[in-house]
Every structure is written in C-alpha cells, then in structure tokens.
Amino acid sequence: MSDIPKTRRRTKSREWFARALESLVEGVNSPSRGRAVYSLGPIVIERGTGSHVFDVDWNEYIDFMMAFGALIHGHAHPAIVDTVAQAMAEGSHFAACTAPEVEAAERFRRLVPTAERVRFTNTGSEATMLALRLARAHTGRTKFVKFEGQYHGWYDPYLLNAHPHPPEMLGPAESPARIPDSLGIPEGVFADVIVAPWNDVAILERVFREQGGEIAAAITEPVMANLGCIPPRAGYLERLRELTQQSGALLIFDEVVTGFRYAPGGLQQKFGIVPDLSTFGKALGAGFPVGAVAGPSAILNRLEWHDSMVLHYGTFNGHRLTMKVVSTNLDLLMANDAAAYKRLNELGDAAIHGLRDVFRRRKVAAIVQGFGPMFQIYFTERKAIHDYRDYCAHVDTRKYSYFIHLLLERGIYMTPSNGLHWIISTAHKPSDIDQLFLVADEACAALG
Ligand SMILES: Cc1ncc(COP(=O)(O)O)c(C=O)c1O
C-alpha cells in the first residue's frame, strides 16, 4: 500500500497535537483517540454543526463517528443548544431531588417498556458496573458470563478478552484463554468470570448445564458493537434468555450502544426479548455524559437505603442540566410518532446497500455488516463475521485503517479502528450518504 495522500492541510492539527503531547498521555484522554489509531496523528476537531465537523485547519468533514455514537442528533442541534443555555442559566446541578430528573425518568419509562424503575449514572461504564452489582445482590451468586470480544466499559471484572488478539492466542472455544485487557487488575477479580464465545449455542448450553446454579448473570450486547457490528445468529439471544431464566440467573442487555438508536425501547424491543436488567448510555445523552440502569422494581429497589442495600452513590448522578438534555433528546426522538427511527433505519440501510454496491463494483473483498443506523465494513474474504474469533482470524484491520485514512483525506470523518462502527444520526441527510458513496468509490480506486 502506498503512502496516504496528504491532500489536506493539517498544520494546526499537528501543532495542537504536539502541544497536547506535552501535557496529556498520548496527547488525548482515551487510548481510542490518539496516534495508535490515527497513523498521521489525530485530527484536532474544532467545531460541529449537524452532520459535519471542522478541524482546526478548517477542513470540513461529514461525521460518521458521532462521538462513538453519543450524538444521536448530530452536532449542536438547536433544541439541545437552547435546553443547555436555559438550564445553565438556572443552575447546572444541585445534587438534590429536581423536577428535570423526574421528567427524564418519566420519559425514559414511557419509551423503554422494561424500565419499571430507572437509575441514572454518568457513563455507560458506571451503568454496567451497577447492573452487575445489582444482579449479584439479587441472586446471591457471584459468577457471571462475559462473552469474548464484548466491551462493557472499563470496570475491572469486564476487562477480559475484549481486545482482539492473534488466533493462536485464543485457546479452544470451549475453554478460551483468559486474556486481561489491562494491567493493574488483581487476578482474583476474574475468579468469578466465565468467558464464553458469543453466538455459539452449544457452548452456551454447556456453560449453563455445568454452572447454571452458580451464575448471577449473563451480560451481552444484543448486537455486538465492539469489534464492529456483529448481529446475533437466529435464535441465539432467545436461547440465552431461556437458559438464564431456567437457571435463576439474570440476563443483562448492555444497550449502551444500541439503546435509543434502533427503536425507542432499544434493540430488546425490536427483537422482542425481555432482559432482567438493561444498561444505557451514549445516545441517551445526545452528547452529554449519562448512563442508566433499568429494570423491574424488585431488582432496582435494592438500591433503597437500608441495612442490606446495594450501594450506588454519585455526586453527578441525575445531573440537572444533563437530565434536561435527556428529556429534550427523547422528545426529539419521539416527535411525529417517532419519525426519527424510520429515518435513522432507512438512511442507515441505504448507506449499507450503497457501500456494498461500491465494493462490488470495485471488486474489493469487503463486506458491510449491520442494519439500520449502525454498521461496519470488514475487509475479508468471508461472507459474514459471526464472532470474536472470526474477527481475529479473518478481518484485515490494517487495510480498514488505511481505507479510513483515505476517507479522512477526502472529507469523511470516521475512526480508523475497525472495532468501532459507523453511526447514522438524525442530522445526516441523503446528500451526506451520496457523498460517502463517491468518496468510498475514490478510496477503493486508491486502495489498488
Ligand atoms: C457496549 C458498551 N457498554 C459500555 C460502554 C461504556 O460506556 P462509557 O464509555 O460511557 O463508559 C461502552 C463504551 O463504548 C460500550 O460500547
């Protein structure tokens, strides 16, 4: 592969990044944003409006990353801007009972049928952390099932086998090698984690046959969004629901990525599966930091204050300004009979089909996987990527990164990490998608 064409001026981005390296580790605040991902160094973003962002050199891009999915309405949506301005003028946060948190919770419950109760957190990681604590307290058990390749935030016990590795490191599917994603976590933390491959019913059945009575919960995304976009095989989630129910374990759906994106009630609603607990984040806050755990009162009420309670504190929980944004966001999503969802799904499907056409026409061995407003491109000879092991063995992530750098040079903003996914927001227009096809076509030609 030849060098990436440097058609765009990045003088100021480079200057800012050099400055960033003086004060911040790797120049950023999360390893998914730095030089490890962007081979030319990250582009320093200055401003966003609707579906477009501008960098500090005033290069314009159509944004398909949308802050890892947080920006369901794109950048600086006027209704969100108004809400924030007004809420800020009134006082951003009181850490007290406020009307905005009640209004946000009421809306949340109207949209998510399984949310008899909701508890707001500040991030998705806090939500998944709390969900596991609740599940363990509710069942009186400690073990939980964590699927290979899935990421549920950076809470210690979840940090096993989320990052991709060479296939020879993975061990047998029936008994995966246990590979921590981080240093600094005592081995004992993982003692109660059962790691299993995702999308494999036979192994799932064995796990529950052998250990079902000890399992507090199984946590899964309904569509695996870490490592791109990997839908469940037909019947897989249904079987997981049956097995958890039969063994007295809870099913936790981690809808931090999928929640409020596919349907008002999340993918659980679209798939018709009722989990015991669900976690939300990202799109819930339309760009503001928030998470949530939702479920039946019988489980959530364990958070009530008494001697044997589940502890969950947080200075910023139910942050007043953020709660106001949540309400505005959910109102926007539900306006005109939830027209936003029709649009998100239609635009997303159009993008997926159009990109498939581009790769077919250009004879590039790539697939576009997913449906509606979330999808990923895999450079692979395979017809589909079904799980972590497929991803590790059959996806050319370096080619993807190179492809994305070609797009970045041509005005499409997307992370070069193949483990993330493309996001359609309500701010995207058909003309953005058409432009994507043109640019993708040009990038395919440049791939050689
Ligand atoms: C499925 C899933 N769960 C949880 C999290 C953690 O959310 P946050 O980054 O808000 O802590 C993420 C973040 O990417 C995620 O993808």
Image (cartoon, grey):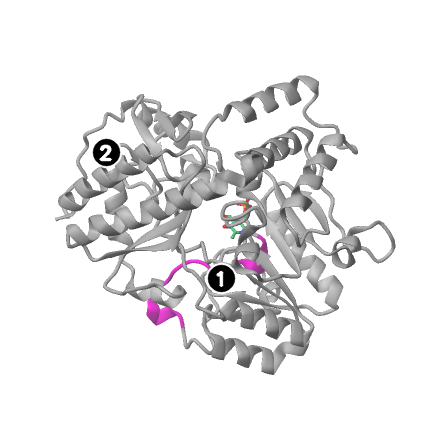
Query: Which x, y percent locates residue 276?
Result: 66, 61
Q: Is residue 168 magenta?
A: yes
Query: Which x, y percent locates residue 283?
Result: 53, 41
- In the image, which is nearer the foreground, mark 2 or mark 1? 2
Stretch in magenta: 155-170
Give the quadrant of residue 65.
Answer: top left
Query: At 37% across and 69% down in the image, what residue appears?
Result: 169
Q: Is residue 116 visible?
A: yes
Is residue 112 shown left or right of residue 427?
Answer: right
Q: Is residue 175 magenta?
A: no
Quick check: is the Cβ at mark 2 less than 8 Å away from ligand 1?
A: no
Give the quadrant of residue 442.
Answer: top left
Q: Amino acid at mark 1?
A: Pro
Q: Decide: is 302 above or below 436.
A: below
Query: Which x, y percent locates residue 411?
Result: 27, 32
Q: Nearer the viewer, residue 170 or 258?
A: 258
Q: Amino acid at mark 2?
A: Arg
Residue beneath label 2, please? 410
Query: At 49% across and 61% down in the image, what residue appears?
Result: 180
